[in-house]
Image (cartoon, rainbow, N blue to C red):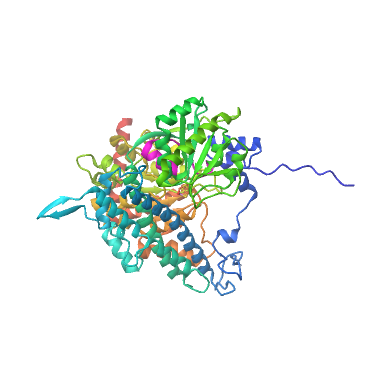
Amino acid sequence: MAEEKKAKAPKVADPVAASYDVATQEMIKRAQDLGVETCFDRAVTLKPCNIGATGICCKNCGMGPCRLPLPKGGIEGEDTRKGICGASPNTIAARNFIRMIAAGASAHSDHGRCVAEVFMSAARKETDAYQIKDIQKLLQIAPCLDVAITVEKDGEVLDRDIDEIALEVAEVALNEWGKAEGELKYLKRAPAPRYELWKKMGVLPRNIDREVVEIMHRTHIGVDQDYKNLMKQGTRCAIADGWGGSMLATDLQDVLFGTPYPLQSEANLGVMKKDHVNLVIHGHEPVLSEMIVAVAQGQEMIDYCKQAGAKGIQLSGICCTANEILQRHGVPLCGTFLQQELAIITGACDAMVVDIQCIMQNLANVAKCFHTKLITTHPIAKMEQDNVIHIEFDEHHAIEDAKRIVKMAIDNYANRGEDVAIPQHKNPVIAGFGVESIEYHLGGSFRGSYYTLNDNIINGRIRGIGAVVGCNNVRTRHNYDHITVVKELIKNDVIVLTTGCNAIACGMEGLLTPETAQVFCGPGLAEVCETVGIPPVLHVGSCVDNSRILLAATEVVKAGGLGKDISDVPAAGSAPEWMSEKAISIGQYVVASGVYTVFGTTFPTSGAPVFQKYLFEDFEKMYGGMWDFEPDPIKHAHKMIAHIDKKRAALGIDKARERVLMDMADRQKLDVA
Ligand code: BF8
């Protein structure tokens, strides 16, 4: 007799296990109650392929995929695994790894090219929407591109016309993507010993596009079959990203939209407002979001919004767009990468406008369950679902495009249902630090140098610098690793520079305020933060703004006392919850710049131990920086701290720190007495 089968409930995520953040937990639960699937639930049913995840699946030709799993118990003796063509695990893992670098470098750099093109339109005065906003920054970057800022006339040195400089900067900058000869001009911004090392190693990038194309060529079947040679090209391409495409994107954005300076705002889903039109901006291009911010703050849209019965327009951001509009305008952060579906699940998102990168296709499916208008804007990033509206954004009619988008959000306010649940969780943030503002805050306005920062590192109050960046990854508890690593670093007197989704996670947790220092920091860092009034965790922007960290590290070297190259500085990098190919490109250019860099959650080369050892050990001998992997966030932080201490010892400043600690103990004894 056939037994009646009970209908099985679909497996879903445990909200508390899935996220460290209470607002996120609430929204995961609400989605499940409403029967709306999110990435957290999909992660429960969709498990990663262990062979692909460890880098040893080759699908670069039609004879495969060739999968070379590690034998149980590891490799004893010779590693005899090979693909149909004979490709070794090292070759396969290195090919996959540098293809990730190529994709990540392309994402950052193609974004940079788009900014350069808009910059060119602005310089040619083809658009009213964009102008040169930060002349100081223009004058600062022009010489780095070999563009003169003065001109000699009749034996006199005169300032050159700003429009002329802007036009030449635009031409030279755009040329960096595809010039036929030479090397990237920005490479000389690195400390001289670093530049010379790259030259000696043969990794000076020629132009940005070429390095990506060469990776695709070398990783085609039957080309480069030496993991060391493959990594040489991976390194060259990554440098072209960090010191090329990303750095140009950051600089040109600063010139067009203004260099960020510290400002106050808020973070987390609780920034959305029930009685306001909620327009969420998601993606990576400030070229789009800057216009939306300008239009939404204009009187015309404010009046239109009032007519629609809303109290105002609440803009907020997701992913790196969030960081861009936060650091220049104080627009609040709505959430990290893993919270994008949840912003719609509040039921209060009247429109979500997206451009490029880190945008989940499932947004369209979630939007179908609510009134939310989902608007794509970029010609290279469309969605197949029929509820998605495409409004192609063009710098020549940017204001009109932005108005259409903002109006669409306002018009949709009336369609919002009664069932709205905005989590009541948010925290204040101070954001918008950069090379210039760190110099100002830590150097003083009259001094204007990194010397004070160096001085505090030398005297041991600040143990070192941690750059903690990168994504969320649904394979680990949302934000937990980010927060744990950062808290452990500041507890041990390591000042943290943060970008990307780590910066948003820190904001959500309340770590981006000066008050944090007294609660979470070690005594030395707390004292410095209190004296100069800065948070111990400095928000320095989006993922392309990791280039700001490279330049800040260069300023530290220039200020003196901490060695001659970035690899001498007591500093370490980290991406605790990385997932994107961009993160791999960032990791590689940070390593190539001389910084020890630890990734969490997973590492895409563990199936090829010899190649992984090359990245984790041999790179230090070649570049002074190397990769590491540590999924446990406390151990992760302590690996960084151990490296920082190793650098302090090499500089001979380890004793100074011991004295600082003794001072504290002495002070405590005095307190007891
Ligand atoms: O460039 S940190 S999830 S948002 S890739 Fe994406 Fe990763 Fe977030 Fe920005 Ni960066």
- The image shows residue 506 at horizontal and vertical percentages of 44, 40
- The image shows residue 391 at horizontal and vertical percentages of 50, 44
Is 553 inside the magenta-drawn segment?
Answer: no
Q: Which residues are magenta?
A: 321-339
Instruction: Name the image quarter holding the C terminus.
Output: top left
Q: Residue at (90%, 47%) from the top-left corner?
A: 1
* Magenta stretch, overall SS: helix
Q: Compared to 190, does 410 lie above or below? A: above
Q: Residue furthest right?
A: 1
Is 338 inside the magenta-drawn segment?
Answer: yes
User: Can you tell which quarter of the image residue 588 is in?
Assistant: bottom left
Work out whether residue 276 or residue 568 is closer to the camera in this orientation and state it.
Answer: 276
Relative to 46, 485 lies left or right: left
Q: Compared to 302, does 340 lie above or below? A: below
Q: Residue at (57%, 60%) from the top-left corner?
A: 52
Relative to 389, 487 lies left or right: left
Can residue 548 be seen here? The reply is no
- The image shows residue 139 at horizontal and vertical percentages of 24, 49
Can residue 208 be seen here? The reply is yes
Q: Residue at (44%, 33%) from the top-left corner?
A: 427
- The image shows residue 470 at horizontal and vertical percentages of 45, 49
